[in-house]
Image: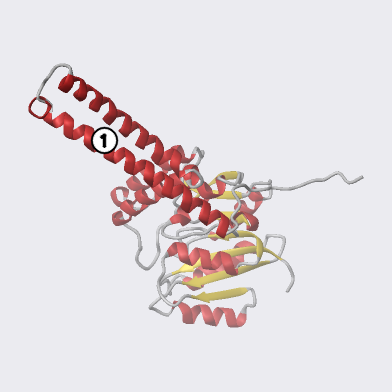
Amino acid sequence: MADINYSIVVPLYNEQDNVLPLYSRIVEAMTGVNGTYEIVFVDDGSRDNTFKILSDISAVDSRITVVRLRKNFGQTAGLKAGFDFAQGEVIISMDGDLQHDPAEIPAFIAKISQGYDIVSGWRLERHDAWLTRQLPSRAANWLMARLCSLDLHDFGTTFKAYRRETIKDLQLYGELHRFIPALASWSGASIAEIPIKNLSRQSGKSNYGLSRTLTVALDLICIKFLLDYSTKPLQLFGSWGLLSTGAGGLAAVFLLFRKFVSHVDVMTEHGPLLFAAVLLIVCGIQLISLGLVGEVLARTYYESQRKPIYSVREVKRFHT
């Protein structure tokens, strides 16, 4: 098979009314783009006629690949499946509900051709519900940008373009698809952002809501840990452990002084402080122990998986 320049990856779940319009708009958008392309549709366990429509399209267009998952695994799994089956040098991902305008795909291609590894969409004007969608999204984006030191305004949108080598080794699970730029930044990926339209859903029902806010918050904690402490967990847990043990130790010294020098009944005069000192020391020892266990697990993981702790962009040698 000839080399493919671009792969458009679209995960779908119960989008039977949007499949044909989406396909037509993608083909129209790619007409003016130089190079070959493919469209990878991932049916994420749809219960309607989404897969049948995709099968009909693929039967008449050889540029279409349809990946059907056994059940609904979620958007992250759908995107990962699409990335795994995509063959293009540049991979563009987008939603299948027509809230992303395929006419903007050439803008992503033009931007990534400037040398960036990832180009992320930025929904400047959003039309979804303010309380259940916009407010949690803004808060998460603000927090994520500061936790990961990335100057991005919109982590949540799926509309992004990637160089193949940037995402081929990324392991995605949970809701981590929205944090791919943060994960890729660990290996030094160059990231740009372009404004995109946020169209209103024309048919079907959104699968997102306020209930996902808690999941996103937990994923933020996970991402921060993976980026900063996955190879050195003792520095995180050990620091808090030493602080806790030190505070408890100081309290214990004070109580010993009161007991043996001032001859004070510690249980009567400083009962709460005594319990706090014991609790701080025990918690500190547990945190340090957790950090040590984390160090062992991290070493086991990296060594057994032969996972590098660095990322090389290129190597040049001078041969005599």
With 298 as the anchor, is 71 left or right in this view? left
* Camera sees residue 199: no
**Which of these two is toward me, 30 or 148?**
148
Q: Residue at x 33, y 45 (%)?
A: 135
Q: Residue 146 lies in what quarter of the image? A: top left
Q: Residue furthest front?
A: 260
The image position of residue 157, as x and y in percent, is 46, 53
Mark 1, residue position: 280
The image position of residue 60, as x and y in percent, is 61, 81
Within 10 angstroms of label 1, few (less than 14), some, or many (20 or more) residues? many
**Which of these two is toward me, 315 or 35?**
315
The image position of residue 183, as x and y in percent, is 52, 49
The image position of residue 318, as x and y in percent, is 86, 44
Instruction: Pick the quarter of the image with the N terminus.
Output: bottom right
With 67 as the anchor, is 141 left or right in this view? left
* Camera sees residue 53: yes
Q: In the picture shown, does residue 208 fall above or below 249?
A: below
Q: Residue furthest right?
A: 320
Q: Residue at x 61, y 46 (%)?
A: 189
Query: The disc labelled 1 sits on which kind of residue?
Result: Leu
Q: Residue at x 47, y 79 (%)?
A: 51
Q: Secondary structure at mark 1?
A: helix
Instruction: Pick the quarter of the image with the C terminus.
Output: top right
